[in-house]
Structures are given as C-alpha cells and as structure tokens.
Amino acid sequence: MLAVLGVLTPVLAAVAAATFLLLGYGLRLAGALPALADTLVGVGWFSLAVAAATALVSAVALYRTAARQSAADAVAVPGPSAADSPALAQARQLWLVALRDRGIRPFLLQELAGAAAPGAGEGHGSRFSSPAFAGPDYAPPGFEGSAPPAPRQP
C-alpha cells in the first residue's frame, strides 16, 4: 500500500498543482473573481509542495530499498548447494536443447514458411495478422455499400 501511495501521491499532487495554478493565474489575468483566484493559487502552490515532498520521500525510500537489496544479494551462502550439482547442470542443458529443437526452431521455421508463401496473412502460414487488413479492397463483414435508404411508402 505504501508503494502505491509513494507513486500516486506525487503524480496526483503535481497534476492538481498544475490545474489549480493554471486556473488561479488565469482568473487573475482575466481579473475575475479575485478571491477565488487567490485561493486557487494558494492551493496550487501547496499541492506543488506536497508533490515535491512526497517525490523526495519516495526517491529516498527507493534508494534505501535498492541498497538493502544489493547488500542482501552480496551475501554468499557457505557450503555446497543444490545449484552446484552436476546432474542439475546436465538436466538444465538438456532442457535448453529440447526447448530450442522442439519449441523455438519449429515455430520460427513455420513463421518463415508462412511469410514466404504468397497470400500469407489470411489464415495461411503465419498466425500473426498482417497490418495490410485495411487496404482499399477491405470491407467489414455485412457492408453493403453506401446506397441511400429506400423511401418509405405511405
């Protein structure tokens, strides 16, 4: 919840400050409603101060979190771990080879074959749509032309 407030508060306060200041100075420039213009300018400057203060607090909190996280990552765990296992390294390598040979390569070859085929994009070859769907001969389903409606009979 604090992270959300740390992001939203400076942004919303800055938008409010800009709005109040523009309205307040606009009313001052027009010479209309001087009491309201002074109030809007005061609220605008207050909102700008809130935005600056919360942005500073959020930046400090972000810096402290990043410093704490990098310090936690720098601590090494002594002793053997499961990640150093040769069986695990071999299984990881076999998984990467299988992913490449049975997953990525067939997908890319299918996409290349679909892109090279003439008339690709309308259900043939590639499973991604072409941006040429709105060409001059494109008509949405059920489009019957721009004929005027028939006159009603009395």
Image: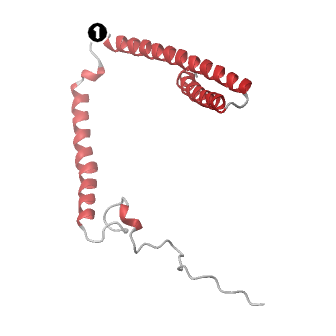
Q: Is residue 67 above or below residue 149?
A: above
Name the residue tied to disc 1: 78
Horizontal side of residue 152 vs 101, given as left or right = right
Residue 89: image quadrant is: top left
Residue 138: image quadrant is: bottom left
Depth order, front residue of 60/16: 16
Which residue appears farthest toward the front when viewing the image?
Answer: 31
Quarter of the C terminus within the rendering: bottom right
Residue at 73% x, 29% y: name it: 33
Depth order, front residue of 119/98: 119
Depth order, front residue of 22/124: 22
Residue at 36% x, 58% y: name it: 128
Horizontal side of residue 10 vs 117, given as left or right = right
Q: Position of residue 52 (x, y in %)?
A: 52, 17
Q: Position of residue 66 (x, y in %)?
A: 40, 16
Q: Is residue 128 above or below residue 100?
A: below
Colouring: secondary structure
Which residue appears farthest toward the right when viewing the image?
Answer: 154
Q: Is residue 99 above or below residue 80?
A: below
Crowd rating for badge 1 (residues with CA inside 10 Å; few <14, some 14–19, many 20+): few
Q: Is residue 52 above or below residue 145?
A: above
Callout 1: SS: loop
Horizontal side of residue 124 vs 97, given as left or right = right
Quarter of the N terminus within the rendering: top right
Residue type marked 1: Pro
Q: How many marks?
A: 1
